[in-house]
Image (tube, rainbow, N blue to C red):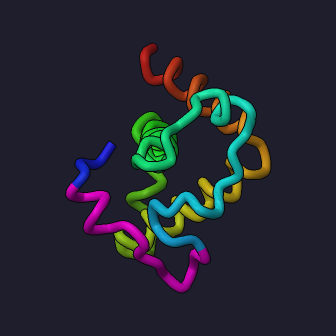
Amino acid sequence: MPSPSEIQSRYGSTTLASPYALYSCSAIVDDDVTKELDFDPATDQRRDYYIGLFHELRFYGNKKHSRKSNVTEWEALCQSWGMFVENFNKNPSGYRERVRSAGERYER
């Protein structure tokens, strides 16, 4: 997960390819698992939780594909965040399963 200063410097950035502001969690719909965590709304706990989920899968993911990208690293990060928001909202349990199985593959 990026440092708090990195998050602060990148927060809210957008690209034309992604309708979601980077690291903004306002478009993410909490599922039952997230609601049970009972985050304090006065803190950044909820935001940090989702940023952690996002970067965990990116860490475990296959890096070969990102090298072939025709966009800058910055644009790729914004696009990936947008896909994370959409994928998580469609199927939160499926996204968590992808993170779990990617972690298992990484450990092998």
71 or 97, which is in the foreground?
Answer: 97
Residue at 43% x, 57% y is: 66
- Left/right placement of residue 106 relative to residue 1 reads right
Residue at x 43%, y 63% (from the top left corner)? 77
Quadrant showing the C terminus: top left
Is residue 12 located in the magenta-colored stretch of the structure? yes
Residue at (43% x, 41% y) in the render: 45
Please provide percent x and percent y for residue 26: 59, 62
Q: Is residue 44 magenta?
A: no
Residue 63 place in picture, x, y as percent: 41, 46
Task: Tell me if I can see residue 62 in this picture.
Answer: no
The percent coordinates of residue 19 (x first, y second) are 61, 77
Extreme residue in the front direction: 42
From the image, give the main secondary structure of the stretch colored magenta.
loop
- Name the quarter where the N terminus is drawn: top left
Query: Going by the picture, which residue comes out furthest to the right?
Result: 90
Q: Is residue 55 above or below residue 35?
A: below
Q: Position of residue 43 (x, y in %)?
A: 40, 47
Tell me, yes or no, if residue 52 can be seen here. yes
Q: Is residue 52 above or below residue 70?
A: above
Can you name the residue that lies furthest to the bottom here? 16
Residue for point 46% across, 78% down:
14
What is the number of callouts on the image?
0
Range covered by the magenta-colored residues: 5-19
- Above or below, comparing residue 7 to residue 13 in the picture: above
